[in-house]
Image (cartoon, grey):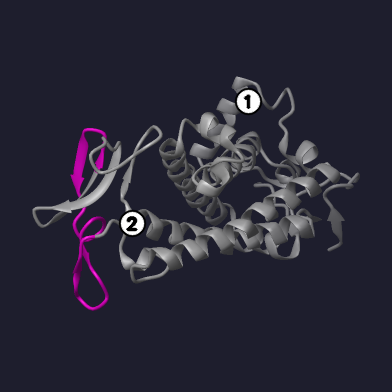
Amino acid sequence: MPVTDVMTATEPLKGGDTLYRHRLSTRMWHWTNVVTFVIMFMSGLMIFNAHPSLYWGSYGANPDYAWLQIGAENGAGYLRIGDLQVETTGLLGRWEDENGMVRNRAFPYWSTIPRSYSLAEARRWHLTLAWVFSLGLMFYLIRSLWNRHLKRDLLPTRDEATPRNIWQDVKDHTRLKFPRGAAARNYNILQKLTYLAVLIVLIPGMILTGMTMSPNLNASLSVLLDLFGGRQSARSLHFIFAWGLVAFIVVHLLMVILAGPINEVRSMITGHYRLPKEKN
C-alpha cells in the first residue's frame, strides 16, 4: 500500500491507508526527551532527598512551614501535604535498600540516580541533561514554527475549541471511542490542548523554575525571582511541573496501549502511521 504524506495528502483517506505522520525532527525530539526526562526525573528525586520539604516564598528551612514533606518519625515513613498526613513506610520516607538495610530517606533507591545517596553526582546528571532538554525544546520549537507544525497540527480551530466539541471529545475518550479512518488523520481537541499545555506550560515552566533556583543566575536574571515569587516557590513549582509531566506520560502511554501500541510506536519510529479501519 502506498504511503501518503499527511502534510500534503489531497486524495480522500480511508481506514487502512498509511500516512507519513511524524517528521524526523519530531521523532528525534520525542526519543531524546524519553531518555533525558527519565534521567533528569530520577536524579531530581535524589536531589529532593537532600531536603525533602517544599515551601512557598524566598527562604525555606527546617523551622519554616513546609506545604509538602516526606520523612520518617516513630519508625514509620510519612507523606504530609498541608494538614493531611499518610503513612508510607516501605515506599516513601522509610524503606529497605537492596541489602536489607533500613533507610530514612524520601524516595527509595530504585527510583533515583544514583541509587546510593550522592547529591553531587545527582546534580551532575541533572544539570548536564538539563542542557540537552532545554536545547532540544528550543530547536524543536524553532523547527515547528518554520515548518508550521504548531499552527497546522496543534493549534485548535475555532470550531474545535467550542465547549460542546471539547465535552464531546471528553465523553468519547471516557467511552474509549477513538477516531477511525480519515478522522484519525489529525489530532483531536484533547490531544491538541494537552500537547500545547506540555509545550508552552509544563516544559518551559520546568526549565525557567530550574533557572530560578540557580544562585549564579539570580543576580543576572533576578526577574525570575520576582516572576515565581522566590527560590523556594520556584522549587515547589519545579516539583509540580515535573510530576505534571509524569502524569502526562502515564496518560499518554495508556492511550497508546488502548489505541494500538504497535501502530502508535511504529509511527514514532518510522514516521508512518496506519489509519485505523472503520468499524462495520
Q: Which residue lies under the disc numbered 2? A: 50
Percent position of residue 78, x then y: 20, 49
Task: Report the residue marked by disc 1.
Answer: 165
Q: Where is residue 2? Give x, y as percent.
A: 86, 61
Front residue of 277/101: it is: 101
Q: Dividing the picture into quarters, in which one does residue 164 lie?
A: top right
Q: Is residue 98 magenta?
A: yes
Q: Is residue 212 left or right of residue 1?
A: left
Question: In the rendered structure, which segment of residues is drawn in magenta?
Answer: 80-104
Which quadrant of the structure image shows residue 44? bottom left
Label 2 crowding class (10 Å Cα cut-off): few <14, some 14-19, many 20+?
Answer: few
Work out whether residue 124 or residue 33 is closer to the camera in this orientation and state it. 124
Which residue ends up furthest to the bottom in the rendered image?
99
Residue 264 visible? The answer is: no
Assign a secondary structure to mark 1.
helix
Is residue 99 one of those drawn in magenta? yes
